[in-house]
Image (cartoon, helix red, strand yellow):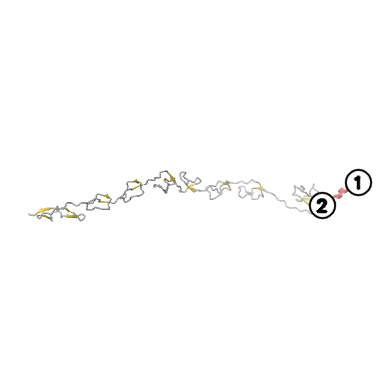
Amino acid sequence: MKKYILFFILLLLILPLTVQAGIICKDGSPSKTCTTCHKGCCSKHGGCSTSSSSSSSSSSTKRTTKPKTTIIYGCTDKKATNYNSKATKNNGTCKYITGCTDKNATNYNEKATKDNGSCKYIIKGCMDKEATNYNEKATEDDKSCIYPVKGCMDEKAFNYNKDATVDDGTCNYDKEGCTDEKALNYDPEATIESGLCEYTEGCVDETAINYDPEAEKDDGSCIYKEDEQKEPEEEEVQEQKKDDPTNPLPVLVTVGGGAALAVGIKKKKKH
């Protein structure tokens, strides 16, 4: 019985020297719990790897070690106000100045580091609600407002207004105008006399010496022949005293090739 106990103890002492393989973690430290490299082995040391060793205690085990990487947590966004150039891993602590970052906007904020969608822009247009082209989005009035023009919009009506944008129910199909065919501005389409007829004016009296057959309206300019002048008596002589300024020379006025009107005539009998 003692022989078996001594053999077992000896076996435990010799066994480590005869192991051909051992479990080494990736950071170079030996595994204290694993006898084989599996998924859960060396979980805190980056995993495991198998390395060969000699059967003798004098043989050395080659170990591959990797340099340790130091992780620095911080804000890695350069646009953030608390950007950390030394940080290797973003920890979600970045801080920003929010605002409009578009230079074309009216509320551009040059200090803003993060756009918050608040940018406002100039929109030109009509800002008068009474206009037909009112633009509710306009921020600057460009004087382009168009206002409704009321009037008759029926082309068949006599008072049709081509500029009208709103029909006001005033269409008139009875046309006013001059209905006198003798007038210069006679309108054959007129149905209502406007009283604005225009005529050729002149003397319409056929007995006058200046009668105008083309005149349609008398303008009061008719000139008539005077009674035939009687033959002057032989003893009556018209004489002008050269030295008498109150007795001017006779002036004869011929009208229409007819009667002569004597002005300033002084009659004197011979003795």
Residue 166's label in the rendered image is none
Q: Helix, strand, or loop for circle 1? A: helix
Percent across and percent down for residue 260 are 18, 54
Earlier-in-chain disc, 1 versus 2: 1
Percent across and percent down for residue 132 are 46, 46
Q: Residue at x 82, y 52 (%)?
A: 21
On the rendered image, what quadrant is the N terminus found in? Answer: top right
| Residue closer to the observer: 142 or 189 | 189
Q: Residue at x 79, y 53 (%)?
A: 51
Q: Is residue 143 left or right of residue 3?
A: left
Q: Residue at x 81, y 51 (%)?
A: 22
- Circle 1 sits on which residue? 4
| Residue closer to the observer: 249 or 126 | 249
| Residue closer to the observer: 240 or 45 | 240
Q: Is residue 239 left or right of residue 75?
A: left
- Circle 2 sits on which residue? 21
On the rendered image, what quadrant is the C terminus found in? Answer: bottom left
Amino acid at pointer 1: Tyr
Q: Residue at x 91, y 46 (%)?
A: 4
Using a 10 Å C-alpha cutoff, classify the residue at mark 1 as few (fewer than 14 neighbours), some (14 to 19) or many (20 or more).
few
| Residue closer to the observer: 158 or 136 | 158
